[in-house]
């Protein structure tokens, strides 16, 4: 995930109806917005990790280590 993607996610959670969410060119988030941002960021990272593990599993079908890790991350175990 690059800097621009992280900034885009922060802007997604910012309250568009706030009087001025920018102070001195910095995006200011409330505690609730920051929590939504953290959840969004974590979900995106989880998705990226699962994608990597799925590709590794496709290359190494002789064992189920990656598939097991995917199930752990998804909370299926």
Image (spheres, rainbow, N blue to C red):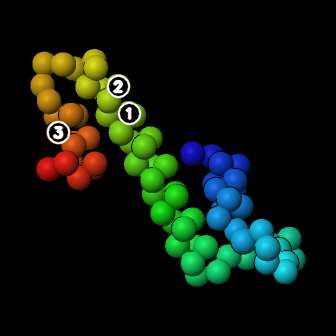
Q: Which residue is mark 3?
A: 68
Counting every numbered tag in the picture gives 3
The earlier-in-sequence mark between 3 and 1 is 1
For residue 23, say whether it is visible: no
Determine contact: label 1, label 2, CB under 8 Å: yes
How far from the left and from the top, in percent, is residue 4? Answer: 70, 49
Q: Nearer the viewer, residue 24 or 40?
A: 40
Say which residue appears at 49% left-offset and 49% top-offset: 44
Determine contact: label 3, label 1, CB under 8 Å: no
Q: Nearer the viewer, residue 30 or 60?
A: 30
How far from the left and from the top, in percent, is residue 74? Answer: 28, 48
How far from the left and from the top, in percent, is residue 34? Answer: 58, 73
For residue 76, say whether it is visible: yes
Say which residue appears at 44% left-offset and 41% top-offset: 48
* Label 1 CA crowd tier, 10 Å (few <14, some 14–19, many 20+): few
42 in relation to 17, above or below: above
Disc 3 versus disc 2: distance between alpha carbons?
13 Å
Q: Quadrant of residue 42?
A: bottom left
Q: Which residue is mark 1?
A: 52
* Label 2 CA crowd tier, 10 Å (few <14, some 14–19, many 20+): few
Q: The N terminus appears in which quarter of the rendering?
A: top right
User: What numbered label is drawn on residue 23?
Assistant: none
SS at mark 2?
helix
Disc 3 versus disc 1: distance between alpha carbons?
13 Å
Q: Quadrant of residue 27?
A: bottom right
**Side of 27 where 48 appears, left or right:** left
How far from the left and from the top, in percent, is residue 55? Answer: 35, 25
Disc 1 versus disc 2: distance between alpha carbons?
5 Å
42 in relation to 67, above or below: below
Q: Which residue is mark 2?
A: 55
Say which residue appears at 27% left-offset and 49% top-offset: 73
């Amino acid at each position: 995930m690059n800097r621009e993607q992280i900034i885009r996610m922060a802007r997604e959670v910012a309250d568009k109806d706030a009087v001025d969410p920018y102070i001195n060119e910095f995006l200011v988030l409330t505690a609730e917005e920051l929590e939504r941002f953290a959840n969004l960021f974590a979900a995106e990272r989880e998705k990226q990790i699962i994608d990597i593990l799925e590709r590794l599993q496709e290359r190494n079908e002789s064992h189920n280590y990656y598939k097991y890790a995917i199930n752990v991350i998804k909370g299926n175990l």
